[in-house]
Every structure is written in C-alpha cells, then in structure tokens.
C-alpha cells in the first residue's frame, strides 16, 4: 500500500513561512499527492493536491520534487490558526490512505 | 444546504451486537469513504466506493461491512467480529476528477461508537 513518511512534529513562529516535508518513495506515475489538515476536535479539511507541477491556492503551495519521491507543503505566513496535524497522502486512484501526519505548533 | 451527514453522533452498544452507522451526502459525489480514527492517531481507511453497487476494502476492513445501493448513501455496519470497535468513525465523499484523480474529500462530523 502507498505509504508516506512525515516528521512527527514541527514548530514554527507566527508570521514566518513553514515548510512541511513528505517522502513518498513508492509513488507511481499516476498517483496524486494530497495534503489535508486536522484541527483539534474537527474532521480533516482539504489543503491542496497535485501530480507533477507545483501547485498554489489561497491556503498553501505544494512543491513536488522532479522525481516525485518527495514533496513540501508551504504555508507562506503561519498563523496561530494553522496549528494542526498535517497529513500527506499518496492517492492511488480512489484510495486515499492517511499516515500519522505532522503535528504543527505555531508560537506567537 | 449541500453536505455530508452522519448519524448518530454518539452510539453505545453492548459486546456482540452489530451496529449500523449512517452516511448520506447530497453533493452528487461519486466516491464515498469510511475512516476510523483512534485517540492520538491518524485516519485509517475501512472501505471506499467509487460507484453505486461497488466498493473496495481499505486497510482495516475486517469486522466491517458496507453497501452502496444509492449514490447518496454509504452505510457502515460494525459487526460483532470487529474486535475493538470503540472509535471515532468518519465518512467522506468526493468527486472523481478522473480515474486517478480524486477531488477534495468532504467529511461528515463523525460518529463516536463506544462498546460497553
């Protein structure tokens, strides 16, 4: 099964950029990379997803390595509301397997 | 309003009883999913379905069953064969943008099952 590897936890300061890494060495050519985040006591929410090119939306940017074996989620200016568990998912068709995620804490 | 609805929110059951969790969506999404989340853990995929009358096992399907008779409904039955059913269950749905590209997952508010 598709498995991603992320650090268990990261810390950031408010208003600074945050780079959340993810390794997905078993990725195939058609697997998309998805990112979700889960705030305490809430269900996960979509952040971004992409295949090969770097992707941007109002929440974040996704930088995908040229060999596609790793990617980085970039939050351009962390706020206290960005404190959450961030999940990187290697999507195999309709099958999205969540890993343990990275717990991001943001210091004021 | 469009969305995904799970019921009940809280459920208690005795050991040996089957219980069915409801999941309904009015987003006209093709795909639906069931995940289980234990305290301090990530989500684990139980079953998913991309089309009516078809569904696939996830990583932890043993002790669970599902049906997909209608596009908008994907109920999950937790059977007595599930050894440790106490958990938080999340249902989600999504569009299928292509055979390999799943759109954004929309999650319900979850059902918390406690086995006494």
Image (cartoon, coloured by chain):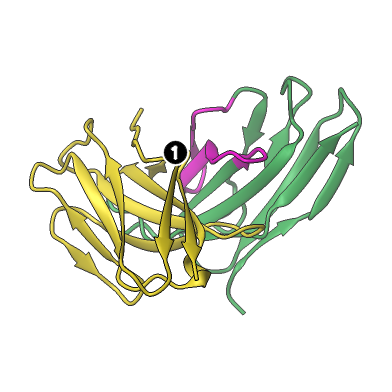
Chain colours: A yellow, B green
**Between A13 and B90, the one nearer to me in the picture:** A13
Badge 1 element:
loop
From the viewer's perspective, is B103 left or right of B63?
left
From the viewer's perspective, is B53 left or right of A5?
right
Residue A62: in magenta span: no
Q: Residue at x 51, y 51 (%)?
A: B32
**Between B77 and A102, the one nearer to me in the picture:** A102
From the viewer's perspective, is B79 left or right of A11?
right
Q: Residue B30: which quarter of the image?
A: bottom left
Q: Residue at x 33, y 32 (%)?
A: A2
Magenta part of the protein: which range? B36-61
User: So how many labels did they put on this image?
Assistant: 1
Q: Quick check: B79 above or below B98?
A: above
According to the picture, the residue beneath numbered tag 1 turns out to be A99
Q: Position of residue B48 (x, y in %)?
A: 50, 41
Residue B39: in magenta span: yes
């Amino acid at each position: 099964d598709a498995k991603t590897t992320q650090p268990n936890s990261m810390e950031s300061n408010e208003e600074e950029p945050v780079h959340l890494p993810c390794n997905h060495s078993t990725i195939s050519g058609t697997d998309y990379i998805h990112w979700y985040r889960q705030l305490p006591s809430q269900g996960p929410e979509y952040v971004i997803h992409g295949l090969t090119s770097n992707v941007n939306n109002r929440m974040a940017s996704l930088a995908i390595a040229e060999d596609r074996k790793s990617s980085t989620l970039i939050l351009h200016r962390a706020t206290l509301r960005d404190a959450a568990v961030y999940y990187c998912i290697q999507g195999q068709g309709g099958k999205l397997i969540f890993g343990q995620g990275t717990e991001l804490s943001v210091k004021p | 309003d469009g969305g995904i609805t799970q019921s009940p929110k809280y459920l208690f059951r005795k050991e040996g009883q089957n219980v069915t969790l409801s999941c309904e969506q009015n987003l006209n999404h093709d795909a639906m999913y069931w995940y289980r989340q234990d305290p301090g853990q990530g989500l684990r995929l139980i079953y998913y379905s991309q089309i009516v009358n078809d569904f696939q096992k996830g990583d932890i399907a043993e002790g669970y069953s599902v049906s997909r008779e209608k596009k908008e409904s994907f109920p999950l039955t937790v059977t007595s064969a599930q050894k440790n059913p106490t958990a938080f269950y999340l249902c989600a749905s999504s569009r299928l943008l292509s055979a390999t590209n799943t759109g954004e997952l929309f999650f319900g508010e979850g059902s918390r099952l406690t086995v006494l």
